[in-house]
Image: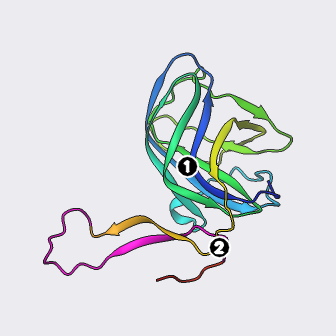
Amino acid sequence: SPTSTGGLITKLAWQYAHTVSVVYPNQTCYFEAVDASTTTINSGTYVNPLTTSDVTRVWSGTLNVSQGWVEVTLDRPFLLLPGKNLIVHWHNNRGSYPGTAYTYNYTVTVGNTATYAQSDGAFPTSAGTLTANRPNARFYIIGQMNDSNSVAITEVISPNDTVRAYQNTPVQVVIQNKGMANLTSCY
């Protein structure tokens, strides 16, 4: 929503329609914040999140689904800035197509708000299909409350858990701006 105050997204949920439960290994989810003017998807061209600087991996793992809302707690919470819209990139690397019965509920929208591509046994390499059928999703957002100077360590890159106490190992972390101010550095 262009009038949104943004916030920290900690979970998302998909509304699974089928009565049979299924396990989806090798799933990855990426988030991308876009300008508020972006309300439709105009190209089915594949966006590779690994080579796109504006896309952030927020979760990966195995998805266990059963009928109803399937919640995913993000590995890396995502800060959606005020006035931005969100694009969700979901990669299903399960390796085989489960069939048309295993579907998620969706809402038909005015414009193309989703794209999909499918390939049995391998990740799709061709352009996807645009659709106005947007999967029903629910997001858990912690709103901002006059928090202008706030940062957090969201990932420890090194050292890992096998560093010995006598080693001189540099510390590498990912620091994310969690506040409303445009911070460019922190101590």
Q: Which mark is residue 148?
A: 2
Pick whichever, 137 or 125, lies toward us.
Answer: 137
State the residue lying farthest toward the front: 146
Dominant secondary structure of the residues highlighted in magenta in the image: loop
Magenta segment boundaries in residue numbering: 160-181
Asked if residue 86 lies left or right of residue 157, the reply is: right
Asked if residue 30 lies left or right of residue 163, the reply is: right
Specify the quadrant of the image occupied by residue 185: bottom right
Asked if residue 49 lies left or right of residue 162, the reply is: right
Q: Position of residue 156 (x, y in %)?
A: 37, 66
Q: What is the secondary structure assignment of the residue under circle 2?
A: loop
Q: Are marks 2 and 1 in contact (CB under 8 Å)?
A: no
Residue kind at label 1, given as amino acid type: Thr
Which residue shows up at 19% across the image and 69% down it? 163
Pick whichever, 145 or 45, lies toward us.
Answer: 145
Residue kind at label 2, given as amino acid type: Ser
Q: Is residue 48 visible?
A: no
Q: Earlier in the sequence, mark 2 or mark 1?
A: 1
Specify the quadrant of the image occupied by residue 8: bottom right
Q: Which mark is residue 125?
A: 1
Q: Is residue 172 magenta?
A: yes
Which residue shows up at 61% across the image and 41% down it? 117
